[in-house]
Amino acid sequence: MVNVELKGLVRVFADGTSVGPIDLLVKDGELITLLGPSGAGKTTALRMIAGFIEADKGSILFNSKDVISLPARKRSVGMVFQSVALFPNMSVYQNIAFGPDMAEWPHERTVRRVEELAGLLGIQHLLDRKIDEISGGEAQRVALARALAKEPALLLLDEPLSALDPQLRERLQTEIRSIQKRVGITTIYVTHSQDEAFAISDRVAIIKDGRVVQVGIPEEIYDRPATEFVAKFLGSGNVLEGVVKETKDGKSFIDINGIVLDGREDLTVGETLRLSIKPEDITISSDMDSDSAKGRVISIIPQVGSFKITLDFQGAHVVALSQDEALVKKLREDENQTVSFSFRSEDAVILKD
Ligand SMILES: Nc1ncnc2c1ncn2[C@@H]1O[C@H](COP(=O)(O)OP(=O)(O)OP(=O)(O)O)[C@@H](O)[C@H]1O
Ligand SMILES: [Mg+2]
């Protein structure tokens, strides 16, 4: 078992493109996800950890021991690659047994290990098939079994489910999580899907332009995004701009185009801030007499269990989720209606940048 610490890890490619510095601590037995857009540096980070490419700066500690000078085969890492790279001419059994065979495990031990993993992943009946005789979802399981075969201390999974249909993906997410917990293996999982990251992870690290910008348990990151990028990337954020209006008794009042928030910690009067408010924290009402803010309805999109209503609020978009079918029906009768909306001051999170 292993805990992994990345300290100031940087990779500079030949053309000058650089990824990092990456700082991250992965606890023993934890499943952490690197979540970020395409090109953020997720695969590069995994490849440096596995030892497939060299880091130009920084350190990679496994249980406080720097492994940067160890070749890949000595790091005890199992990896599932972004594009499943199974050996097409070999059987499922031979694919899973590949690592143990290379390491010259006794035949009996390899057979036991392959059977154990095949049982865990529900692919016993496929062991004699060739790779082109199994489905995509089955191939993902074989790739996972192959990565686990040599009993690695660390498992790296690079978008292992991206090619699958949503139902199968969801089922395998649950399976990967339960196998990971049963085996107790420290795991770094890469995805650019928020749903997948939230479904599978103990903690999530949001990665942007080669750096980790926020780490936390899914609820924490969703409820309290640190930056505008995180808020927007997670879709949890209406991002609105406010100005610190006045300060009284050490508390500052923020004005968002006429919406004044309850006193916050001391801020500088005149300072401009960005705030994130989640759609589910915004309440819409057709009561125009209230002194709540007013917005013009731009669109109404039905979703599972609610309607996503987008308002124009003085040039800014405000997205709200509503379950009020009567209200939605009324709003749909004629377009461009104006409604009142409100949210609790404490649900507005001040963003760092
Ligand atoms: N061999 C290379 N030479 C030059 N630049 C590279 C090389 N490999 C990756 N990059 C660049 O490094 C950055 C990070 O790439 P990386 O593959 O790590 O992104 P990613 O987060 O895995 O993206 P995706 O979600 O699309 O897989 C990108 O800008 C990419 O173009
Ligand atoms: Mg990638």
Image (cartoon, rainbow, N blue to C red):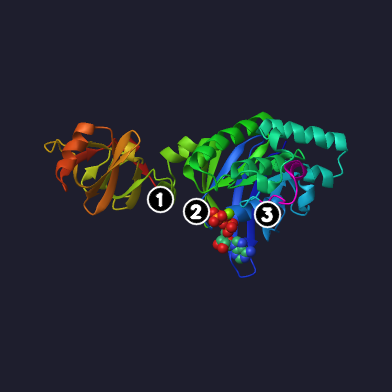
For mark 3, what is the residue?
Answer: 48
Q: Position of residue 247 (x, y in %)?
A: 28, 44
Q: From the viewer's perspective, is residue 30 above or below residue 232?
A: above
Does the closest atom of ligand 1 sit within 8 Å of the Cβ of label 3?
Answer: no
Residue position marked by numbered label 2 in the rendering: 37
Furthest residue in direction bottom, as rendered: 15
**Hey, what amino acid is under mark 2?**
Pro
Q: Which residues are magenta?
A: 85-96
Which is nearer the N-term, disc 2 or disc 1? 2
Q: Quadrant of residue 347?
A: top left
Mark sitting on residue 201:
none
| Residue type at the position of mark 3 | Met
| Distance CA(mark 3)–CA(mark 2) | 19 Å
Task: Report the side of 75 relative to 36 (left or right).
Answer: right
Classify the position of ligand 1 by quadrant: top left, top right, bottom left or bottom right: bottom right
Q: Which quadrant holds the N terminus?
A: top right
Residue type (three-letter) at the residue carrying disc 1: Glu
Question: In the rendered image, which residue does mark 1 sit on?
Answer: 228
User: Circle 3 sits in a helix, a strand or a loop, which is it?
Assistant: helix
